[in-house]
Amino acid sequence: MGSIDFKLEFSIPRVIEKFLSKAVSSTFNQKSLISMKKTFFYNFFPSKVEEEACKVNNTPWVATQELVEIRDIYPAPTINLENPWQIKKIITRDEVILGNLVISFFESFEYILRYWMLDVAKSLVINENGMRVNVWDITKENEPKKYDGGNVWFRKLYNDDYSLSCTGLFNDHILNVGNEIGLYWDPRSSSFMFKLFSQVRT
């Protein structure tokens, strides 16, 4: 299956303007954001037609799963621009070798995919090659740098976690084991935001 582009329809992210001019309020206007929780619906019981097809083909029924949207039982997470880093992690050896930042299943669904349209999220889940995305590096608040094109990918891993592949980011910062970084998804610009908090020199 081929790659899928995650098309952007926004100009320079307004969150970047916040870091440059400090003019944006400290909290997103939550009412202006579309946030729907994504989850998998599992079908363990075949329909009559599916059951008959299994009998004809002499094959066992295999449970299926489908990505769906549901309403939040509890209040949805909010993004506070004074401290927006919903995903913080310490870089591991495997991440350095592969040039990928691993994002857990929970973090991917709770802080990223909830802001994606359902059809786009479904494409990510079923596409082995992942999707092209944009990353804004705002480690230097007055000099934000954008990584995009075919060099930045967000994809599902075999263990249901997800990875953000951006070798340029690793190379430019010389990211190494033990470095602490922060990420969040900016729904207004459809981009990942990245910041390097601390760096371990070797």
Image: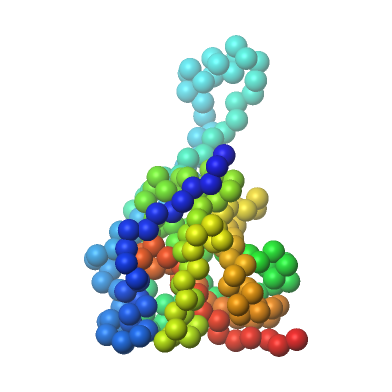
Name the residue rendered at 42%, 65% in the picture.
Answer: 191
- Vertical relation: 29 (above or below) 116: below
Left or right of 23, for residue 148:
right
Left or right of 179, for residue 153:
left
In the rendered image, is residue 90 in sight? Answer: no
Q: Position of residue 189 (x, y in %)?
A: 36, 66
Q: Position of residue 3 (x, y in %)?
A: 53, 46
Q: How many marks?
A: 0
Name the residue rendered at 47%, 76% in the picture.
Answer: 145
Q: Quadrant of residue 188?
A: bottom left
- Vertical relation: 175 (above or below) 103: below
The coloring applied to the image is rainbow
Q: Quadrant of residue 76?
A: bottom left
Left or right of 47, for residue 35:
left
Foreground residue, 66 or 52?
66
Foreground residue, 16 or 95?
16
Left or right of 128, for residue 189:
left
Foreground residue, 69 or 187?
187
Name the residue rendered at 61%, 80% in the picture.
Answer: 173
Quadrant including the C terminus: bottom right
Q: Position of residue 54 (x, y in %)?
A: 59, 18
Name the residue rendered at 60%, 77% in the picture.
Answer: 172
Identity of the residue furthest to the front in this view: 149
Foreground residue, 160 or 174?
174
Identity of the residue furthest to the left in this view: 31
